Amino acid sequence: MAKGDHIYVQRAGGLYAHHGIDCGDGSVIHYSGEHWYSPRSVRHTAIDAFARGDEILVRDYAEFFARLRDTRSLPRRLHVQLAALLRGGRTQTSFSPGAVVERARSRLGEARFDIVLHNCEHFATWCKTGISDSEQIQALWRAVLDRASYRQWRRESVVSALLDRDASGPSGQ
């Protein structure tokens, strides 16, 4: 693990994963709450508090961007094109480690957590790439929605990404 890595731990025997950004100093920025039932906000905590005894893994962005380029994934490709547009046309796949941590720090205290639309994976992926995305939620929707309903949900999420873009623009890359 290194500064700026998107890290995660498997929870509840692999039922779901919790995600954050490694600050490179033994700490992590992630959505967290005092208790499982308390409101979530972006917090800066010790890496041990983040892991809670679980193995810490690093997100593989080569695989992530390969999925985005998949021709069967038009909404995700649109996310990539939108992110490039917001970066002034640059097609950079991820930010530098320092910029990733600064992006995470810029959202400290934010309390917009939503398990489906704005969770810890959305946060960490946005910090790393500028794309707000959650593979866990994608997999959930693929499992529970019929094909037409899933496509409609993905179209709506692309529109949501337009509205939830980085207000700071192309700076800090």
Image (cartoon, rainbow, N blue to C red):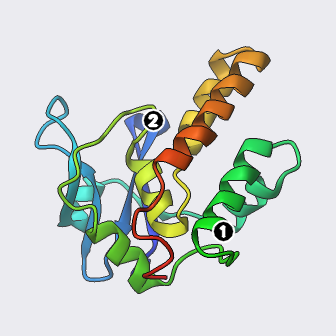
Q: Which of 43 and 75 is in front in this view?
A: 75
Q: Mark 1 is on which residue type? A: Ala
Answer with left or right where residue 116 lies relative to residue 83.
left
Single out the residue that lies furthest toward the left. 34
Q: Which of 119 and 86 is in front in this view?
A: 86
Q: Quadrant of residue 27?
A: bottom left
Asked whether residue 11 is in view, the answer is yes
Picture mark count: 2
Q: On screen, 106 above or below 20? A: below
Counting residues from the start of the chain, the first of labels 2 and 1 encountered is 1
Name the residue tied to disc 1.
84
| Image x and y of residue 105, in percent | 27, 70
Q: On screen, 151 above or below 16? A: above
Q: Which residue is drawn at 45% across and 35% down?
A: 117
| Image x and y of residue 165, in percent | 48, 55
Regarding mark 2 in the picture, which secondary structure is present there? loop
Q: Nearer the viewer, residue 76 or 16?
A: 76
Q: On screen, 97 above or below 20? A: below
Question: Which quarter of the rendered picture does the N terminus lie within?
Answer: bottom left
- Crowding around mark 2 (Cα neighbors within 10 Å: few <14, some 14 to 19, many 20+) is some
Regarding mark 1 in the picture, which secondary structure is present there? helix
| Image x and y of residue 7, in percent | 44, 63
Circles 2, 1 touching at the beta carbon (< 8 Å): no
- Crowding around mark 1 (Cα neighbors within 10 Å: few <14, some 14 to 19, many 20+) is some
User: What's the distance in space between the residues labelled 2 and 1, CA to CA?
Assistant: 22 Å
Name the residue tied to disc 2.
117
| Image x and y of residue 33, in percent | 17, 43
Single out the residue that lies furthest toward the right. 71
What label sits on residue 108 in the rendered view? none
Answer with left or right where residue 85 lies relative to residue 69.
left
Asked whether residue 2 is in view, the answer is no
